[in-house]
Image (cartoon, coloured by chain):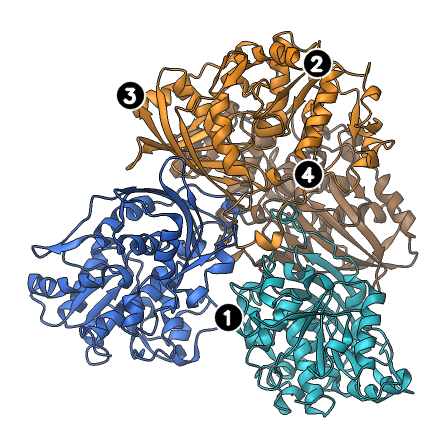
Chain colours: A orange, B blue, C cyan, D brown
Amino acid sequence: MVGQMFINLLENHPWFNVTYLAASESSAGKSYEEAVRGRWHISSEVPGYVRNLMVEDASKVEKAMGKCSLIFCAVSLGKEEVKAMESLYASKGFAVVSANSAFRLAPDVPMLIPEINHEHINIIPTQQKNNGWTKGFIAVKPNCSIQSYMIPLHALIVKGYKIKQMVLTTLQGLSGAGYPGPSAYDLVDNIIPLIKGEEEKSEIEPQKILGAIKDGKIEYDTSIQFSAHCTRVPVIDGHTVCASISFEGKKPSEKEILDCWKNYHSVPVELGLPSAPEQTIIYRNEPDRPQPRKDRDSGKGMAVTVGRLRTCNVFDYRFVGLSHNTIRGAAGGAILMAELLAAKGFINK
Amino acid sequence: MVGQMFINLLENHPWFNVTYLAASESSAGKSYEEAVRGRWHISSEVPGYVRNLMVEDASKVEKAMGKCSLIFCAVSLGKEEVKAMESLYASKGFAVVSANSAFRLAPDVPMLIPEINHEHINIIPTQQKNNGWTKGFIAVKPNCSIQSYMIPLHALIVKGYKIKQMVLTTLQGLSGAGYPGPSAYDLVDNIIPLIKGEEEKSEIEPQKILGAIKDGKIEYDTSIQFSAHCTRVPVIDGHTVCASISFEGKKPSEKEILDCWKNYHSVPVELGLPSAPEQTIIYRNEPDRPQPRKDRDSGKGMAVTVGRLRTCNVFDYRFVGLSHNTIRGAAGGAILMAELLAAKGFINK
Amino acid sequence: MVGQMFINLLENHPWFNVTYLAASESSAGKSYEEAVRGRWHISSEVPGYVRNLMVEDASKVEKAMGKCSLIFCAVSLGKEEVKAMESLYASKGFAVVSANSAFRLAPDVPMLIPEINHEHINIIPTQQKNNGWTKGFIAVKPNCSIQSYMIPLHALIVKGYKIKQMVLTTLQGLSGAGYPGPSAYDLVDNIIPLIKGEEEKSEIEPQKILGAIKDGKIEYDTSIQFSAHCTRVPVIDGHTVCASISFEGKKPSEKEILDCWKNYHSVPVELGLPSAPEQTIIYRNEPDRPQPRKDRDSGKGMAVTVGRLRTCNVFDYRFVGLSHNTIRGAAGGAILMAELLAAKGFINK
Amino acid sequence: MVGQMFINLLENHPWFNVTYLAASESSAGKSYEEAVRGRWHISSEVPGYVRNLMVEDASKVEKAMGKCSLIFCAVSLGKEEVKAMESLYASKGFAVVSANSAFRLAPDVPMLIPEINHEHINIIPTQQKNNGWTKGFIAVKPNCSIQSYMIPLHALIVKGYKIKQMVLTTLQGLSGAGYPGPSAYDLVDNIIPLIKGEEEKSEIEPQKILGAIKDGKIEYDTSIQFSAHCTRVPVIDGHTVCASISFEGKKPSEKEILDCWKNYHSVPVELGLPSAPEQTIIYRNEPDRPQPRKDRDSGKGMAVTVGRLRTCNVFDYRFVGLSHNTIRGAAGGAILMAELLAAKGFINK
């Protein structure tokens, strides 16, 4: 699902050009169109530009050499296999921008939401040194469940407000589970109150993203506590979050929060990154929004939509957030990372 | 929807016998079957026992006199009209057991979850005195969204644990909205993160239920704070809740919580109330339960199913609860109340 | 799914008693409860009566000997493996009543809808002779897609009307695909206009069911032509059919058709078979019925609901039919067959 | 729904410019954004170009005079009111291109699928003469349910094959019912086998579209018989049809049918109409296509997708067709009609 979304989003990309495709051995030697026959899920047709591109065996890194310098990586492999493959490509000089989770918690691998922790790219030279790599490196995107609340939180943090605690419940779309994902039998007239491993990711990854580089490592910001309940609902795309937050120290008024969101300064926009949405955070005044089907495509799927800001009986405030999980939360987010890395000179445009 | 569920659940009731039906003037004079033609939603057919019963005009209380002594009331009217109607019947000597919200916060009207606050029925003589009623009275059931967490909470409270705070997100079924309720256009590939008025009810009603009679009033227990996010999901029946709780003082272990739930002592069971489920709280060990379609009918829709008990990063514990909203949360809950009132001598069996 | 439905429906069966369970080697040695842990899909809990029954290895027929005389068979195996297994049990003297498709088109195996072709059980002695079996035999139920139109058709045929052609489109529920069946990703905001192999079964099997025994074989009635479009829709249980029919010769009036359905004489009812619904064909006058969720459980899932009878611009008449696919169309239908066989002396009650 | 889709599709239209908006009196005087607040259903936001355009009272035709010459009309009024309104505008010199059904069967009003019966625009001078109109006229689009089969049929007819009979079942999306349309309670775990009035339209309108102008009237082609079963399924957009057809005389081979579809000559493409899809009929070889969510947006919602061509036991062939009901079947189809009328000189570009 994520790989296909990369293909869709990279069509006509102004900076990047898809020149090389690799997959498992069983797809090697086929055209992309053949390789995905009967498994192309996200729209009616495989984009024309990539149909006849030959798929190579991803385990043979030498095939890629000279064909490209940046690798977008989204695979269905075990953690150790992912680590081995991504390290292999990095060791051969490729910039690896990964949608996989294997390296997310590694202290010298930046896990980026470009609006928030773009400075974490400065860990890359340390990573290269640690591994003896001269040119290649690995950068990863975080889990798809966190964008809907991390960007709204960051808009407050960057204005000097200190978040203390956040309790959240996600209602996540099906595409986040890959294909085939859950059975229709389990999601008609039903919801599933569990997504394996998702709550842990939704709690820990934010602490790394909000952390800082210190002594050659990205140190976690453990001053904020997150508690996540993750549920699966019969929605195709879009992860919705119901969030309650408490502040440490100075508390903003509702108006101040809305101002933080409305006037959020986006580094990706400032840098002119092609995938950055014009308005990063969209606040909707209608009391029943955001809704996944109606709001997920805002900003071409790269904006975060927020609504229902109100006070909380237990914490300070509550709101509802929404982001598109396979665009902002996966392929689009990874492309935005690659654009950031290119703008900062880590990748050739 | 709730009215129809009353009809379904009262078929073959061992204590109560449906002898009289009343509705709006437009239905008066029709058989029940005619009155609900094209509007019978909950199962394939109107139960035979009630098909030919004549529907009377509910505004004419004298029609009911001598026909019955207990009135179950579920109507779609404005708050003041409901108050007027329920008071009228009570003033004429009827026991009014209501699924409506109009009197829920009245200090001399018991709002009952029979397992929890059965003692609140003792306010009834005060209510009768306040109104100058000799025999009639009003008792109400709480909102359908709260049973999934109030009974599990009560199982802890009754064992001496003190709950301090609870943050919860509900994923509520469609039948809770009545018919026609939300549009299918809004609930295919979508969820709605708002149910008007539901969050307030879900936060305030628990404080009354946990309160105590003092000085002729039911005083709220404001030592517990509730914060509720209420969402609508494409599920027919069943309200699911994702809850986080913190304790004041002594904290139970996971095992102690499970024991509280497993060994929950139910006064309705003790009293032999016909609608009381044998096992009030069912804890499921499977990590992906409870699920609405699979668990809502447990205990004939009167049990509460709980799962996923685990610690919380922000509070002390988290869990998922589920109850059937039109049975336990509405008609079934009201019938259980009436059974309690009958067992305690307030209503003739 | 079908196996679990057998377990549900056989609880408290007045004639049959579940004494023995067998499954694949991997389940052997476990209690039934353990064997289905995490895979019990059809209701909240495994029925108590069968939880602790030990599951045996189905390939070891000798284990079953002396434990039971009737075997209900629903497995997920290849056609040849099913044939081998069912023949093995029949050869050892068991009455094999099968929900599998392997033997459906065998000329000496009765494929029964007890209301329609109960006389086909008379092929059993021939089957036994052909195979050298003295006591055992195999009888099969037809595909779950055909009950919704075959019983309504039979009600006309039995009154002397001759059907010439039928064009039908089915909208089939998910449980018919087994578990996990189609992906939720493919059935939210979507339908699938294909069910592999289903159209062929829906066209051929009716011809065998309407056929007659001749020269030791069940000969197909090829005077009726069926054309089936089969689609999958996001419905849990219930197969709906939109059917157009033409007659050869005498054409009934609408009223005559309704009379045929209303007064349908059911041999299973006459024989007092426990699973036979009191009213086999239920005609609903509401213009928007039958609907799967509202009508599938009629007659405890054993009735066929019909509606929207009207003339057709191309053929003679059109109607909509509905039956519960895992009850009438699978486990319930197979149990009704076994009851027929018991009533006729082929199986000991 | 259709009105909103007009707004979406006319953004940046190369020939037409939205200069004037009118609605019911209750919306008059508001900006378009205000007028649709809380009722904008089809995407995240009202297009910017139209937000501040003032909405006028549609009953005051004089307000429109001088502001525009072409009126797209989609309203929720009774048949006679629609006729009065559309006639009023036509009488004042406006070209009225209507998505309403009121005039569809009028013998001097062209009901156009531009690919099929573009020549019917030649009835317009007669219509003007009949009504005493000098410049204005009315042209209408047919019902949204028929595009999925009429264009594939036309591709055969235009090559000289004569269709005799067609039996079809539609599985129609929710947006075809307008907003709010059916209740979610009726379409979760359910389908509705009735759409009021839809079957009649689906049977009669094709005969007019395939007819010819004779003696100042569009005469129906009654040599083809259509029989339609129309059902509602939980799909947002997209009407799917399962169709069986028989031929009179020469029967094409499967390959010939596929060639007719593949090489379909589209007059709108030839005329360079901006909304004409490059490939009008898309045949998909995958056995499980077309599917509404995956194929409805083909050709920007203006293509018709066909699949599963195969022989029929009863008729000659069967296939599955799909078209987007609010684009090709409504607003997009009406815009294509207006483009045709402009290309032919009936409307100023």
Of all chains, the one bearing label 3 is A
Identify the mark at residue B44; answer none if there is no mark: 1
Percent position of residue A200, x then y: 51, 35
Q: Are marks 3 and 2 on the same chain?
A: yes
CB atoms of marks 1 and 3 within 8 Å: no
Q: Which of marks 2 and 3 precedes in the sequence?
A: 2
Q: Nearer the viewer, mark 2 or mark 1?
A: 2
Q: Is residue C316 left or right of residue C133?
A: left
Percent position of residue A118, x then y: 54, 14
Q: Which residue is mark 4?
A: D125
Local SS, label 3: loop
Look at 26% across and 56% down and name the residue there. B158
Nearest to the observer: residue B141 or residue D170: B141
| CA distance for labels 3 and 2 | 43 Å
Q: Are marks 1 and 4 on the same chain?
A: no
Of all chains, the one bearing label 4 is D
Look at 87% across and 46% down and name the residue there. D258
Identify the mark at residue A136; answer none if there is no mark: 2
Q: Residue C279, relative to residue B197: is it above or below?
A: below
Q: Is residue D18 left or right of residue D106?
A: left
| CA distance for labels 4 and 2 | 73 Å
